[in-house]
Every structure is written in C-alpha cells, then in structure tokens.
Amino acid sequence: MDITTRIKAFNLLGSELSSISIEEIKSLAAKTANQNPWFTEKEIKFAIKEIGEHLTTEKISEWIAPYDFKTQRKTIALVAAGNIPLVAFHDFISILISGNRVLVKQSSKDSVLLPYIAQRLIAINKEFTDWIQFSEERISGFDAVIATGSDNTARYFDYYFSKYPHVIRKNRTSCGILNGFETAEDLEALGNDVFRYFGLGCRNVSKLFVPVGFEIPKILDAWIGYKDIVNHHKYANNYDYQKSIMLLNATKFLDSGYVLMTENEKLVSSIAVVHYEFYNSDDSLHARLRKDADKIQCIVGGHAFSGVAFGKAQSPALADYADQIDTLEFLSSL
C-alpha cells in the first residue's frame, strides 16, 4: 500500500467511527465490562467519536506532510496501556500510516477496543491483515518499540528494550491555570477536563493553579452538571475512601458530594480529588511550571501559559504527541 491508499483507508475508517451505532457501543461496553469497569458506554462512545473526527483526508495529510517515510517496512512493537479507552490508538495509526507493521502487546485492561478498530480497518482494506498483529504473550521479532507505562514499568522497559530503537513513556498528568477572569461556562468546560474518563488519563486535569484570592467554591458550583459521576460504583468507592482519609488526617478540603478539592502542592491527585495551589504572580507560576515540566502532559486554561482550551484536554489533534515526543519523527528515522 502506498501512502495515498493508507490515507484513504483511514479516512473511510474515520467516517465509519463517526457514525457508529449505539448498538455497537453497547456491545463493546458489554465485552469490556468485566475486564475494565471504567470503560462505560459514555466513555467508549466519546473515545471512538473523537478518533473518527480526526481521521479525515485533510487532517491526516496535514499531519504527515513534514515527514519522509522510508519504503522499507519494519515491525514496531506497541506495548499498550489500558487506563482509558483506545489510549494506544494514536501510536497504532502512527505506525501504520508511516508504512510499518504493528505488533501490539495488549493491556489486560483493554484487549477489546483496539482489535475492534483493527477489524474495521481490515474490512476496509484487506492488505492491512499482514500489517497488524495482536499478542497477549511475550513479543518477539520486532525492529523498534513504543511502550507506555508507569514510572516503575518504564524502568523495566528501558532495560528490556535497550538494544532496540524505542520510545518509552512514563507517568504524566495535566493541570489547569485560572487567571480569575473565567466565565461560568469556562469553569463548566474545565469540568470535562477533570471528569472525562473518571480522571484516569494523563491528559486529565488533576491540579489547578489559581490566583491568590480566588474563591474555590465557584469551581464546584460550575461543576454541578458532573455530579452523576458518583453513581459509578468504582468512582464512588474512591470518593468515599479519599474523604475518609482526609477526615482521619484532619486535612482541610471542600466537598461537593462527588469530588473533593484540597490545597496541595502535588501535581498528581487521587481519583475523585482535585488539588489546587495559589500563585502570586506570573513569574512565580512560570517558575513552578518549569520545575515540573517533565511531569506535565498538557496545560488547560485561558492563561498565557496554557496551551489547551477549557474542555479540550481529551480532544488532542493528531500532532499533539504524548510526552511531547514526536512519534512520526521517531518512526521516519528508523
């Protein structure tokens, strides 16, 4: 397949995913229910629709334009995470669009959704049959590796895959910056960045930087539309547990009944908890962000230091690379 054929296939895939039926979503959710209770119909639908919207001929062509892909195909091992639905899709399409084969080592928490997408792609063009392979066992016979995991597993990946060209991603989180001039609509949209996928993604906002004097309850007032999240049993268990710990430790916190907010310098917060930190000036804020730059995936808000609009953290474009590592540049260099 030449590049034009591959673009056409992914464009058709995008069209199909954009119009996926609710019956298919329900079927996928039923298959993933026992494997990963966090993968609800709502979150699966969002993930698939987002992918579909980005798979257009125009967007794909613009994305790959800067790169010169070699004609010799290589096999790229993709060690997938399973924290949010289809989290490995961007690596999956990057490998295939660059003209390489993909060997996917699936996560035990997500072995349904990516194979489903692959089957749809193969139905569009059967040549992809020889380009895609899934494995739940130990993988071998590859030329390079893209792997995502925790900080602990990343050390293992670095050792195990040291002799191969590789991209190894570690734990990251995202934060939001408020400047005090946000509208109620801005703060409501910020809730999507916090609660989408139950806060389990590296692009989910777990920490807010707010100017001194900002009234934190305004945020909770704007998030009332997300209150039903606590009806999910696993989220509710986390909410109850974190609240109990804070009460036992006499930690000061604000409680909305579905999320806890507490002043804390740590970037990463637990599920159902959002940290906030006050800043005095842009200079002090900038210094704070530089300090933890290697731990931040993206920054949401209307501040000059923000790169993502409110509500759009989980809607990255094709050129928004995880950990700011240009995957296509890596693949084109092999």
Image: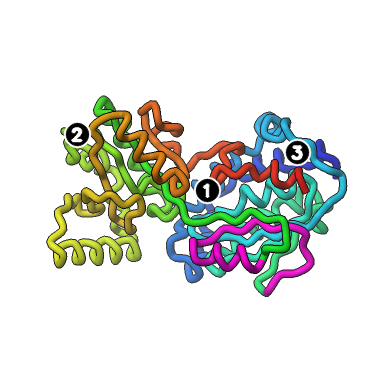
For mark 1, what is the residue?
47
Instruction: Based on the picture, tell me whether residue 148 belongs to the magenta stretch.
Output: yes
Camera-side mark, 2 or 3: 2
Instruction: Please name whichever residue, 218 or 321, is drawn nearer the observer in this view of the structure.
Output: 321
For mark 2, what is the residue?
212
The residue depicted at 29 percent of the width and 57 percent of the height is 230
Number of residues whose C-alpha sits closer than 10 Å to that of mark 1, classed few (under 14), some (14–19) or many (20 or more): some
- Disc 2 to disc 3, C-alpha distance: 49 Å
- The structure's colour scheme is rainbow
Of the residues shown, which amino acid type is indicated by label 3? Answer: Ile
Q: Quadrant of residue 241?
A: bottom left
Instruction: Based on the picture, tell me whether residue 157 belongs to the magenta stretch.
Output: yes
Q: Residue 121's x, y, as percent?
A: 72, 50
Q: Residue 181's x, y, as percent?
A: 26, 25
Would residue 73 appear left or right of 147 to someone viewing this image?
right
- Disc 3 to disc 1, C-alpha distance: 20 Å
**SS type, badge 2:** loop
Query: Where are the magenta residues, as a range?
Result: 138-160
For mark 3, what is the residue?
7
Q: Residue 149's x, y, as percent?
A: 53, 61
